Amino acid sequence: MQVPGVRNFSTRYLILIYFGWWIIWMVLQTLVLFNAELLTFDVAIKDAAITTVVLAFAGYIMITSMRFYHPRQILQLTWSIGLAIACVFLIRWIATQWLQGEEGYLEFLEKTLVVRGLFSWLMISIITIVAWVWFYIREQQEIESRKATTEKLAREAELSSLRQQLQPHFLFNSLNSISALIILKPEEARKMIQQLSDFLRGTIRKDDQLYVSLEEEIKHLHLYLEIEKVRFGHRLKTEIVCQDEAKKMMLPSLLLQPLVENAIKFGLYDTIGEITIRLEAKSVENLLHIRVDNPFDPETSQTKPGTGFGLNSIQRRLYLLYGRNDLLSTHQNSVIFTTELKIPQSA
Amino acid sequence: MIKVIVIDDEPLAQSIVREYLQGYSQFQVVQSCNDGFEGVKAITQHKPDLIFLDIQMPKINGFEMLELIEQPPAVIFTTAFDEYAIKAFEAHAIDYLLKPFSKERFDKAIQKWLQQNSQTQQKPHASALLSEEVRQPEERNRIVVKEGSNIKIIPVHDIQYIEAYDDYVKIFTQKEMFLKKKTMSFYEQSLNPSQFVRVHRSYIIALQQLTKIEPFEKDTHLALLKNGVKIPLSKTGYLKLKTVLGI
């Protein structure tokens, strides 16, 4: 998952380092042989050049093969020894051709073959190890970054699907009410279509907006409640109490409505007769506290409190956004079931 | 005249059915009910020929309401939930209307009922719901029973044991006993087999109530429950119990 430009830059950089490394060795070899008065400067520099070019080529072969293939250590060892021997023969052959006329050089060359072999092997091994470490680290980094990207995508997809979890039953039942109203009270049918459209539009639009103010969420909630009251007006009463200070606080979008929807369903299906759903919001120590009360019957409750209807998805969303599992809690007394929500404020 | 009752917890949903029925002069809606409790009362009182029944309703759902009626009338379900369709037809519903439904779709359902009604003059079909044993009921976590005019909801974990009683079963809880017109095999199938074991032709016990198995006469055993009741075990029942308990 690297950007191609970055990769090119780092490759060019590496090639430079590689050449630099070999030039240093060439200079060193020249100086050592010349200073030890084993060879003349001219011959020493030629000798060093041959050695360096051959080894640099061998090193390149090693790196290239390592890039696609990570052999076992024992194979690597054999491979590097074989390559070192091949290098020595190649050096010897080139040097014999090029420096034939130099007096005493060939003799010197034959004498130092073993040392040259060891040196070649050492060099090739160093390059192999460095290359191995380099490629290993880069592979790990790529795996990490792929993993991070995958996780991020999965998290975003999950959040978006959790946000969009509109209850299809709500939609179908609302349409059914509209169907009834069209004959009974056409004006109200039109009004309800308007409300339903506004509500749905709010649900869609907020999709890309992660956080909204409580005031806005409550507006959206009102649309929802108006629709529910057309369906259950004979039974459903709502009460919303919101502290001024809390109105400007932020919360994840489309969180409040599922919470209230859950309370309404719970209240309506668990009891008979009129119910009041109460929502209270206040600011407590830089946390937005929201509390929703609904009546219920502990004896016949169809769902175990806390796992009921939509609370799981709210819990999951809060965990994905804040990494905490303690933001949603429920408790109950004999007839009232309470859901409490705490939303941390970032600033 | 054909008597109809509409049971739905949304008044507007009831009114749609009433409105669609206006075109049929022979049908008369004798009552509209807001929940299953009203539904049971109204059905007992009016003995309707056909009911329109919502599924998701307060306290008891449409299926549970049907269970409480000795001879249920013909049923057309009206609901926004399509996941209950199979269960509805297993309950021998005439039809299953998905909200919102059109007049044409509604008319089809009425035609279906008229046809079936002329073929089998006699019993409406939902009665088969109660007698049919073969179908696999879903695992349940509560049982709804009727006691006189009261309707009681028993959470399954309150049940201590169930005893066969002619066409009925007696369901025993800590404090009470309830009669229900169901069969032993119905409960054997619908209760969680890791919690309830049929230990005898006439008994199903809750495992968590079991304290002791003691020998009784030759080759037979008794199960002792926490409340002191002794339940006879049949030979197969004894083996079954041993398997479930892993002994």
Image (cartoon, grey):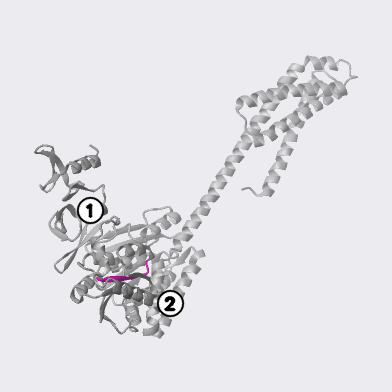
Residue B64 in percent (x, y) is at: 25, 64
Which residue does the image show at 63% across and 36% down from the upper left? A134
Q: Nearer the viewer, residue A330 or B49?
A: B49
Q: Residue furthest front?
A: B119
Neighbour tally class for label 2: few under 14, some 14-19, many 20 plus, Cα within 10 Å: some
Residue B83: numbered disc = none
Q: Main secondary structure of the magenta part?
A: strand
Which residue does the image show at 74% across and 29% down from the upper left? A58
Q: Secondary structure at mark 1?
A: helix
Neighbour tally class for label 1: few under 14, some 14-19, many 20 plus, Cα within 10 Å: some
Q: Nearer the viewer, residue B96 or B131?
A: B131
Q: Is residue A82 above or below residue B61?
A: above
Q: Is residue A69 left or right of residue B4?
A: right
Residue A282 seen: no
In the rendered image, which residue does mark 2 sit on? A195
Q: Quadrant of residue A243?
A: bottom left
Q: Is residue A236 left or right of residue A194?
A: left
Which residue does the image show at 75% across and 35% down from the upper left? A19
Q: Secondary structure at mark 2?
A: helix
Q: Chain of mark 2?
A: A
User: Which residue type carries mark 2?
Assistant: Gln
Q: Which residues are magenta?
A: B73-81
In the rendered image, which residue does mark 1 sit on? B185
Which residue does the image show at 76% across and 21% down from the upper left? A88
Q: Is residue B78 magenta?
A: yes
Q: Residue furthest left?
A: B217
Residue A133 seen: yes
Residue B144 in percent (x, y) is at: 21, 62
